[in-house]
Image: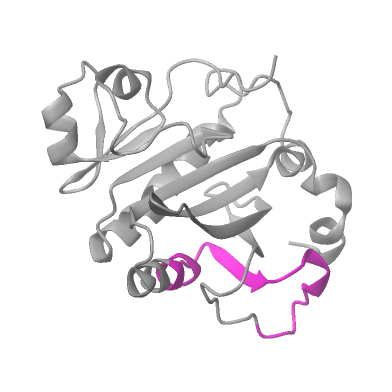
Amino acid sequence: MQRSEFTRDENWHGSFYELCIELGPVGNDALATRALDLLWRRPELRGPWLDPADYDVDAEPLIPSIQEGTYYGWLTLPDGNEVGFSSYLIRFEGGSDWLELCIPTGMFELRYRFIYPLDRATSPYLVQVDDLFARIAGAIYEEVPFQLGLIGEEASGSSSAADLTKEDCEQGGLLVPLSHWQKLAPNREVSMVTSDLVHVPLLGPHITFG
């Protein structure tokens, strides 16, 4: 990704298309560190940097740490397009640790014909984004089995493993451990990301605002 694209403020505007991973009960530093390391070791990711302005193709990226705040990098999509994203760990006291990867819609506007609201039917590039998010999450899950994954526009906070319902599962936008999926028994076809992690895309458009 060109530095001029990565550092241009307007490309970081808009809402966020997110992969949100509920790692488990808050405070497990070893688990969070391992998940963060697995995320940034993915070959599709470049970075991290603490600010988009720190991007330099010749500079060594940072070693990610759970002690820092937001990291920035860019992601290579299956069609070869590169988009900037931010990533961070959220720790909810009395709740869970969440690892999140967030693409601003300004990056989609940079690369694609942008239609809002976001919908896989009218914006087919979202299909490859969803599939790539699922693969990234699956690679993390194989070493750090997590409780739930959310995929979609402003997905953060929309559900949790403890609150997940059959209706949520039928709506989709989820990565769910197979045992939890079978317990809720929703009526949706799924794809298997790993032998015990299912991915079910969101049905219909993402309606976040308005």
**Residue at 52% in and 39% down:** 156
In the image, is residue 64 above or below residue 210? below
| Residue 180 % position (x, y) | 17, 36
**Residue at 31% in and 16% down:** 167
Quadrant where the N terminus is found in the figure: bottom right
| Residue 172 % position (x, y) | 37, 25
Q: Quadrant of residue 45?
A: bottom right
Q: Quadrant of residue 73?
A: bottom right
Please tell me which residue lies in front, 133 or 81.
133
Q: Which residues are magenta?
A: 36-60
In the image, is residue 104 above or below residue 117? below
| Residue 81 % position (x, y) | 65, 50
**Residue at 52% in and 35% down:** 155
Q: Is residue 110 left or right of residue 38?
A: right
Is residue 54 located in the magenta-colored stretch of the structure?
A: yes
In the image, is residue 189 above or below residue 69? above
**Residue at 42% in and 41% down:** 131
Q: How is the image coloured?
A: one colour
| Residue 31 % position (x, y) | 33, 69
Q: Is residue 188 left or right of residue 64?
A: left
Q: Is residue 32 left or right of residue 177?
A: right
